[in-house]
Image: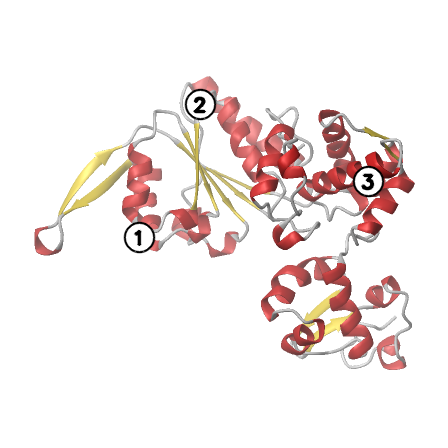
Amino acid sequence: MNWDETPSATADDAPPGPGGRLVGADADGDDQAVEAALRPKDLGEFVGQERVREQLDLVLKAARQRGGTADHVLLSGAPGLGKTTLSMIIAAEMAAPIRITSGPAIQHAGDLAAILSSLAEGEVLFLDEIHRMSRPAEEMLYMAMEDFRVDVIVGKGPGATAIPLELPPFTLVGATTRAGLLPPPLRDRFGFTGHMEFYAPAELERVIHRSAGLLDVTIEAEGASEIAGRSRGTPRIANRLLRRVRDYAQVKADGVITREIAASALAVYDVDERGLDRLDRAVLSALLKLFGGGPVGLSTLAVAVGEERETVEEVAEPFLVREGLLARTPRGRIGTPAAWAHLGLTPPPRAAGGGQTGLFEA
């Protein structure tokens, strides 16, 4: 229930995920279209993120009781965990309109001033990827958040004049996947900061059952469990996999998603039991088969799998590291015992006995 998807025939037929990756956590244009109908409308519907949900509920209730606007909110965490959904829930809970924009879209202080000056009192401004905002706009935002005022510069050079512009009280909801890139002065101006964690399989099962109901899909508990186990702890991926399994069940079976149907469908889409796809397995296979488990440099590994260095580092490696299948060391990338076991390979004696890094010691 904290994802991003909407039933739409056009969007459903498009290649899933960024670059066609079924297990990609970022949403492309089609995913964004499919997300809206499945979004929960209030905190009571929102599944998972118990601590953040509890804390945010207190913040919003207190603001409503005071009859004022809620504190500024910063939400951090990986893509697909529900940051956009929570921003919409904040606006709904405060009975306020919401304005949505993103950091990359604000390249000049004037861009931000135009947005801020048009806000209504109590309005929620959702600023996605806030860490990618330009520095001049960022500095203007400091004053806007704290004093509800901005200085608009008119003219250039020695004749330039700063005209103070009063703003109505508003709530800024910032979302970021890289909270460490936010400067401390900006982070300190948020009254509430919530970090979104990856979901447990049981939580994803609840997400999948709710989505299946909205999509009018019949799914058994074991089928939901199978999909949840391959969803990388991310509701957005869980919903995407559910739609692909639904298609398979509709064409190849009687439309009911069982464990066997889910497993067969995801095998067609190259998503294995741990959520690894073709790229992930290609990286692991090259690391283990060609380089004996490493250590091997990132550039060499990228050439071996026929991908760009950035693709391997930013797309494949984060999940492999989180799953304990790959380790980054000063000497290069290393495959862990779990990686050998997952691919059904026998590690060489060096890797099995501890080798050069000590990662493989019993």
* Callout 3 amino acid: Tyr
- Work out whether residue 59 or residue 293 is closer to the camera in this orientation and state it: 293
Is 107 rendered above or below residue 122?
A: below
Q: Pick the quarter of the image with the N terminus.
A: top right
Residue 274 % position (x, y): 81, 53
Judged left or right of residue 246, residue 333 is: left
Q: Check disc 2 and report the residue beneath it.
A: 96
Which mark is nearer the camera, 3 or 1?
3
Looking at this rendering, what residue extends furthest in the left direction?
A: 159
Please tell me which residue is depicted at 46% across the width and 24% down the height of the picture: 63
Q: Pick the quarter of the image with the C terminus.
A: bottom right
Marks 3 and 1, how far apart in space? 50 Å
Marks 2 and 3, how far apart in space? 41 Å
- Work out whether residue 11 or residue 61 is closer to the camera in this orientation and state it: 11
Is 334 rendered above or below residue 190?
A: below
Q: Check disc 1 and report the residue beneath it.
A: 136
Marks 2 and 1, how far apart in space? 28 Å
Judged left or right of residue 167, residue 200 is: right
Quadrant of residue 313 in the image? bottom right
Is residue 253 in view?
Answer: yes
* Callout 2 amino acid: Ala
* Callout 1 amino acid: Pro
- Work out whether residue 36 or residue 253 is closer to the camera in this orientation and state it: 253
Contact flag, marks 2 and 3 (Cβ < 8 Å): no
Please tell me which residue is depicted at 51% across the width and 28% down the height of the picture: 90
Q: Check disc 3 and report the residue beneath it.
A: 248
Residue 57 % position (x, y): 57, 27
Is 261 rendered above or below residue 23?
A: above
Point out the tag, 3 or 1, that comes first from the N-terminus: 1
Is residue 2 in view?
Answer: no
